[in-house]
Image: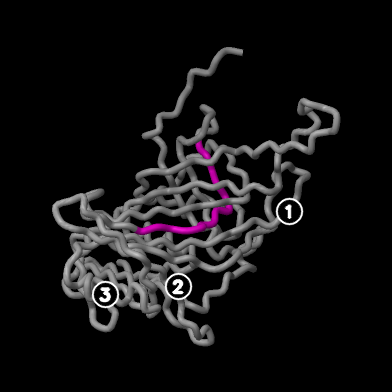
Amino acid sequence: MAQATNYFPSQNVSVWFQKETNVGDQPDDAGLKKLQTTSFSIPEASVPIEYSAQRAGTFTQTASQGHHSQGTKMWTFDTTLRGTPDSVLLATEAVFEDASSEATLNNDYAFPSANYVNGAASAATFEIRFIEGGADATLHNMVCQGCVATGFTLTEDIGSEGGELVCTINWATGFSPTYSGDDISSPAYDTGTPKNIRSLAAGSSGINGGALEELVIQSWELSVTRNIERIHYKDQTDGSFEPFGYAMVGGFEVTGSMTVIRNDDVHDLLAKFYDSNTVDINITEDSNFIIALDKCFLNEPSIDNGGAVLMETIPFTVVGADDISSSTKMVGITIA
């Protein structure tokens, strides 16, 4: 057989997203939208090989010991997007099922297990399609079904990406990626403008430990993560080994950091680094973008003396209210 000479240039690959109607069922392409993806990884349709225990008195592995581990794998990959409203609301919907312009993760959140069952009405599972990401001249696309988000990170840095907001989403699926030659019949595009740290609103961004400390923010980061596991496999007769569905294990972990110029306002926060009291953190931009974190513990900061002025990076952990009998906001993201 002659050697194949086809190839797929990386820059030709585009990434398209749509929410599924039913978990793991590929909808038509009417809802596919091309967001402003800047980097990504593509999972291959493969599973790892496992070997059974070595037989006593033997010193080599045999072919009968090898088994491809079907029915247990979660394929993982990431997409990094320019921080437009569409990108941010994709992240909030995928991680805590809220795509409203005032997306909120509350302290009484409950994972909607029934809507993460294979074939059930989907709470927030997605098809992600890598156009020109295949390996075959005919089947030139890679399609990932039943994708769930295990976390997202939002970040802005005055010295990077022109200050633009960057949104990275971490994905996983228990459905094996497939190859497709289908074209998109009704393409839609994200034409939104990314948010930018240079539009931080004066007097509204900083840490409030009683009175707002309006910090001189150089960069900030917020990550919301969770642990999602696949449940067994539904049917092996067709070789697909699709999962029963997904379950969330443990709670959300919400962390972040701010890097600020070290000054009087930072000094005024000193007690909050050791008094076991929470503070609220707000990031407000003039361009209809607000992050409100009502209860945060400040962690041990670090001082950077490598530049023209001293900088301080303040890590934090976001927590919910103790009383879960009433719904209170843990993370609020307003964007338009």
Magenta stretch bounds: 141-154
- Quadrant containing the C terminus is bottom left
Write down the quadrant of residue 123 in the picture: bottom right
Sequence-earlier tag: 2 or 1: 2
Residues marked 2 and 1 touching at CB (< 8 Å):
no
Residue at 54 percent of width and 47 percent of height: 76
Is residue 141 toward the left or the right of residue 210 in the image? right
- The answer to if 152 sits in the magenta stretch is yes
Measured as percent of width and height from the top left, residue 86 is found at: 36, 59
Do we see residue 104 in this rendering?
no
- Where disc 3 sits, the SS reads loop
Q: Which kind of residue does numbered mark 2 sit on?
A: Leu
Cβ–Cβ under 8 Å for marks 3 and 2: no
Label 3 or label 2, whichever lies nearer to me, is 3
Task: Quickly name the residue at label 1.
Answer: 234
Dominant SS of magenta comes to strand
Left or right: 282 as drawn, with respect to 231: left
Q: Is disc 2 placed on a helix, strand or loop?
A: strand
Question: Mark 1 is on which residue type?
Answer: Lys
Given residues 141 and 208, the one toward you in this image is: 208
Q: Which residue is mark 2?
A: 105
Work out whether 16 lies above or below 247: above
> As shown in the figure, which amino acid type bears the numbered disc 3?
Leu
Quadrant for the N terminus in the image: top right
**Residue occupied by mark 3:** 269
Q: Residue at x 73, y 53 (%)?
A: 234
